[in-house]
Image (tube, rainbow, N blue to C red):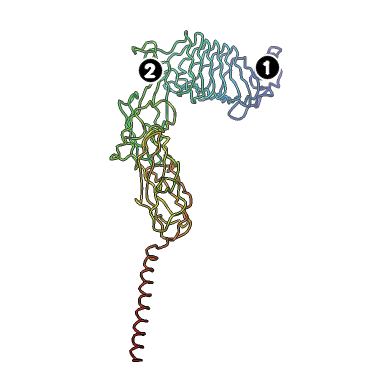
Amino acid sequence: MFIALWHGPMSMNHRLSILVCLTLLASIVALPSNAFAEEDEIIVESNMTWSDDMTLSKDVRVQNGGSLTLSGIEVSISNGVEIFVDSNSSLNFVGSNLVGETPQGDDSPGFNINIAGKLESSQSYINDGGISASGSLFFNDTSLVRSGPVILTSGGAAISLGGDSSFTDSSGDHDIRARVQSTIIWGEDVSGSGGEVNKWERRLADQSIVFDVRYVTYEISGMRDFPTYSGLSNDDGISFIDGGRERVVEIAWSDDSVENSSIWSEQASVTITDYRTAWNREDSGIGNYGGGPFELGWDSVVVVDDGTPMVGWVSLTPVNDEDMPLSNALVGDSVNVKAVIENSGTAAAQLYINCDSSDTGTTAQISPSYPGTTVGPISESTIEFIWRVSDAGNSSLSCRILTPTQLVDETAFGGGNQTSATVDWKVPVDEGGISLLIPAAIAITLGIVVAGYVISSRLESGEN
């Protein structure tokens, strides 16, 4: 900064005037050690109080645990100035008036206050300011003129209005715009802009419904902007409601409203229209997965995990004719196998299995080739099939539950592998072959006897 001083002769009154000017100038530009000015902003990093009327033309950043208090002053704020308070810092207005300088015809706020930490205002007046917060706002006996809607940008943001606080001439149709989890406390004596400007709106954006299956269709009823809405899950099983666009889910009506209730809240419900897989084909007798109509709610992500199966193995056992576990068998025999499947889910499943020989890794000789069953919710079911082998030796079955190809994650409905106990397969002794040896032996013996008799007879004839 350059200050020109008078070097010529001057009167006592003239010298006194210059001294007063320098003193006032120093009071405006001098900053304490806990604040410093950069080219376009003022940084406050610890406790600081402004108690003189001023024109604020630079952005202000209160950060790193700083606290800025405006106490009993008039502040004229130049157009476009931003006051930012980080999550560890605070801003306080005590008996102060803050007035923006918006150019005529411009409907945007003259200045902006962005609070990640905390703002407390008491007995103050804010005109033509835009206020947004991911932190906490406390207004007591504070007038907000052309400074609405106050925008709460996160679910953790909060606003508390007490005393004779009031809104006047908020732009749009509401004084506060909040997220669904934001906290709003509206005191009994607080007044809104009135007329067609409601007290607050809660909005929800990017809400999605997540299914375990691709291409599920559903309908939603009860949303404000749509009598009914139809959706379809994508390749990842996800469907963004209205493409993820923001929608109003709650309105606190103006005191001048003719609505029957003071607050309207969305009560939307979801109905599954097509949720089919290989386990609940239309000809299976099993209905759509996903359960009956359910409340949509306001969660950002709605996971549909009701009305679906969850299957797993209980046992896989080769058995004998007495239904007891089998450890030995003859090559060529048909061995009965029992596969027990459980379903801990809330919907039935018509499923199938396939099996390999665990010793060779090749497809096992079972009949039928893909045995199956229908297992109801919270129950067990047994699959019975036949197992054969062609070679002697120790062998076991390794079977897998075949899961629907429509699943985004093949394990979403359970499934998995199971290996049976080892069976010692032996080559059978051919009892039929042994029985044939006896007649053959007799025939050979008789042949020898007959041959001996013939030879003996001929010898006797020769002697005669």
Q: Secondary structure at mark 2?
A: strand
At a point 35% along the width and 75% down the height, the residue shown is: 446
Q: CA distance from mark 2 to mark 1?
A: 58 Å
Identify the amino acid type marked 2: Trp
- Residue 32 relative to residue 239: left or right: right
Q: Is residue 434 above or below residue 28?
A: below
Going from N to C along the chain, the mark reached first, 2 or 1, is: 1
Position of the N terminus, as image quadrant, is top right
Farthest front residue in view = 464
- In the image, which disc is placed on residue 264? 2
Q: Check disc 1 and report the residue beneath it.
A: 23
- Residues 193 and 87: in front is 87
Image x and y of residue 78, in percent:
52, 22
Image x and y of residue 239, in percent:
38, 35
- Residue 160 relative to residue 383: left or right: right
Q: Is residue 260 above or below residue 299?
A: above
